[in-house]
Image (cartoon, grey):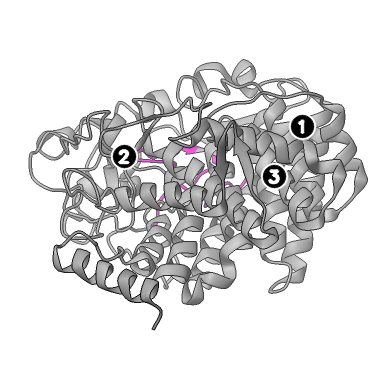
Amino acid sequence: MRRGASFCLLFSLSLALLGLVHANPNYKDALAKSILFFQGQRSGRLPRSQQLAWRSDSGLSDGLFAHVDLTGGYYDAGDNVKFNFPMAFTTTMLSWSTLEYGKRMGPELPNARAAIRWATDYLLKCATATPGKLYVGVGDPNVDHKCWERPEDMDTVRTVFSVSARSPGSDVAGETAAALAAASMVFRKVDRKYSALLLRTARKVFQFAMQYQGAYSDSLGSAVCPFYCSYSGYKDELLWGAAWLFRATNEMSYYNIFKSLGADDQPDLFSWDNKYAGVHVLLSRRALLNNDKNFEQFEGEAESFMCRILPNSPYKTTQYTQGGLMYKLPESNLQYVTSITFLLTTYAKYMKATRHTFNCGNLLVTPNSLLYVAKRQVDYILGENPIRMSYMVGFGPNFPKRIHHRGSSLPSLASHPQAIGCDSGFEPFFHSANPNPNILTGAIVGGPNQNDGYPDERSDYSHSEPATYINAAMVGPLAYFAATLN
C-alpha cells in the first residue's frame, strides 16, 4: 500500500472513531418514499395497487359542470384543488428525473412511470375533451381554502377552469406541452402507442400556446391568483415547451422557435413559475454531450446560473442558512432547494460525461463542486441539519408530525365513516396539537425558516405544507445518490 493511501485510510478511520464521519442517509429508502408520496395526492378512482390505504376515491364528478370527464390527476398540496400549472410542472420534472436517472432507479422505475401516468392521463383529458379549449383546473380555490375536509368528503363547488383563443394561457399551455412531450419519451420504449398520443397532443397544445399568446393569470384572475399566478410571464413556458418538443422530436422548427423568442432572463432560481434556468440546463445537454456549437449559448447561461448558486462563487446571489441550506424565499423554500438541486446534479452529470469544467471568476468549478452542494442540500432535507429534523415525512426517526394537509390531518374513512363537513374539520382536528393520524409517507414539507428552525405547526402552511413540485424535483437527485453512494 502506498504511503499516501495508508495515511488517507488511517485518517478516515480516525474521523470515523471520533464520530466526525456520518454514514450517508438511506437514499434508496428516501427515493422509494419520495415517489410513494404521489399516491397520497391522487384524485379520482384509486386502483387496487394503492399503497397509502387511508386515501379513498375522490373528485369522481370532476368536469361535470363542463359536461366532460376531468377525473384523475393530483391535488397540488394540502388542499383539494387541481391546479394544472404546477401539476404539469410536477409531471415535467418527474419525467426529466426518469429520463436522466431511470437506469439508476432500480425497482422504483415502474413506480415513477406510474406517478407520471396518473398525471398525464388527466392532462390528456384536459387537452382533448373540448376542441379549442384547454382545461387548466378543477375546484374553486377561494371556496376550498375556507374548508378543512377530506378529499373524499368534498362538497364544495367543483368549478372547471379553461383557457381558449379568447382567454389565452400560453404559460399553462406551454407547461402542459412540456409535460406531455417529456413524458412521451419516458413511455417511448414501454408503450409506443401511449407515447405517440402524448407527443401528438403536446404538439397541438404547444401550437395553441404560440398562436394565442397571453398569460392565464390575466384570463382567470382570482381562480389562480394569488395561488399560482404566472409572475414570470409566459415566455419562459414557451421556451420550455419548445425545448422539450425539440428534445422529443429533434425537429428544427422547435429550435427555430426558441431562437426566435430572443434573449431571456438570467434568474437565480428555478420553480413551477420560472423555467429559464431549466431551459438553459436542458439545452446545454446538446452543447456538452453532442458538441453542438449552436447550443453553446445555453451552456454559458447554465454556467452563469451555477455561479449564482455556488456558495464560494464571486457571483453568488444565493443565501445559505447557518446550517447550510439554500434560502431563497420565506414561503415553501424547499421547492427552490429541490428544483435547484436537480439542476446542479444534472449539469454535473453532463459535465462528468465530457470531463468538462468551467470558471466562476477565479473559482474553478468541477462536476464534484456541483455535486458537493447538491448532496449537502439533499442530506439537510433528510435530517443532516442543526435540529436533526428530516423534512421528508416518514423518513428517519424525527420528521414533521403536524403537516398542513387535509387528508393527512383528518381521520380516514375507515376509522371515521361519517362525513366531516366544510367547517367540522377545524375543531377538533385542524386546531389539535396531536400528530396527524395518517402519515403522508415521502411528503417533503415547505421546510425550515432562515434560522434553521421548524415549529411543526399545522397552521404554519409556509413551512409545514407539502407540495407535488417539491417532491418531483427531489426524485432525480435521490436516484443519483442512491445509485452512487448507497
- Which numbered circle lies on residue 209? 1
Between label 3 and label 2, give the one nearer the viewer.
2
* Secondary structure mostly seen in the magenta stretch: loop
Q: Earlier in the sequence, mark 3 or mark 1?
A: 3
Q: Label 3, label 2: how many angstroms apart (C-alpha)? A: 33 Å
Span colored in magenta: 57-82
Pointer 2 with pointer 1, Cβ within 8 A: no
What residue is rendered at 79% in x and 61% in y? 196
Rendered location of residue 386, percent (x, y): 18, 43
Label whose residue precedes the other's in the sequence (3 or 2): 3
Q: Residues within 10 Å of mark 3 (few under 14, many from 20)?
A: many
Which residue is located at x 46 percent, y 59 percent?
Answer: 45
- Tell me whether the residue at label 3 lies in contact with that at label 2, contact meaning CB atoms closer than 8 angstroms: no
Give the Cα separation between the discs numbered 3 and 1.
Answer: 11 Å
Query: Quarter of the image holding residue 85?
Result: top right
Give the residue furthest to the front. 3
Looking at the rendered structure, the kind of residue marked 1 is: Ala
Q: Which residue is mark 2?
A: 324
Front residue of this view, candidates 318 and 255: 318
Tag 1: Cα neighbours inside 10 Å, few (<14), some, or many (≥20)?
A: many
Q: Which mark is in front, 3 or 1?
A: 3
Q: Which corner quadrant of the image does residue 185 belong to?
A: bottom right
Does the magenta-highlighted stretch encompass residue 459? no
Determine whether label 3 and label 1 are within 8 Å by CB: no
Residue indicated by mark 3: 178
